[in-house]
Amino acid sequence: MSAAAWEPQPDLDIDGRWFRLVTDGAAPYGQYHCENDLVWAEFYAGGSLRSGRLVGHRQPDGSIRAAYCLLGTDGELITGECTSIPEVVRGTLRIADHWERADGTTGVSYIEEIAPPLTAPNAKSEA
């Protein structure tokens, strides 16, 4: 996504909202939280992800500068930084994550808002 195509939207509220990675098949999902300029998120299992966390701060233009760590189902630990751009696309809240991993690989991933899960992601069944 080029910077020219993005219109700053500093007032988009992502606090408490749930998002899922845009991909075919099983995908990780997570919940974002905001307090003033502080932003954090927890990501839950889906696809090759076991768990993940993100923490950063909101910029005046509405973008988010953050660091993240992810644990894959194979035990791989992935760390990096990203600039995330919340936007509304065809009526859906979406975040474009422009990321760079600690190993130097780069890319862009998209997550879209989903309805909250019916049960808590970390709920354990009692037998």
Image (cartoon, rainbow, N blue to C red):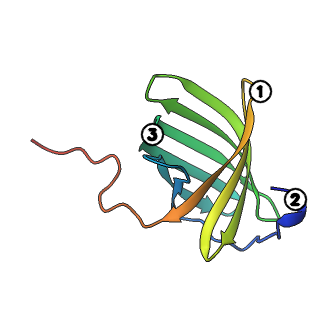
Q: Position of residue 92 (x, y in %)?
A: 59, 72
What amino acid type should be assigned to the residue bearing mark 2? Answer: Ala
Is residue 4 at all visible to an observer of this figure?
yes
| The N terminus lies in quadrant | bottom right
What amino acid type should be assigned to the residue bearing mark 3? Answer: Gly
Q: CA distance from mark 3 to mark 2?
A: 30 Å
Question: Which residue does the numbered mark 1 point to in the structure image?
Answer: 104
Question: Which residue does the numbered mark 2 point to in the structure image?
Answer: 3
Q: Earlier in the sequence, mark 3 or mark 2?
A: 2
Front residue of 22/84: it is: 22
Query: Which numbered circle lies on residue 67?
Result: none
60 vs 101: above or below: below
Determine crowd level at label 2: few under 14, some 14-19, many 20+ residues with C-alpha closer than 10 A.
few
Q: Secondary structure at mark 2?
A: helix
Residue drawn at 42 percent across, 46 percent down:
26
Q: Position of residue 51 (x, y in %)?
A: 46, 37
Outermost left residue? 127
What amino acid type should be assigned to the residue bearing mark 1? Answer: Gly
94 vs 30: above or below: below
In front: label 3 or label 1: 3
Q: Quadrant of residue 12?
A: bottom right
Outermost right residue? 4
Residue drawn at 61 percent across, 77 percent down:
91
| The C terminus lies in quadrant | top left
Q: Secondary structure at mark 1?
A: loop
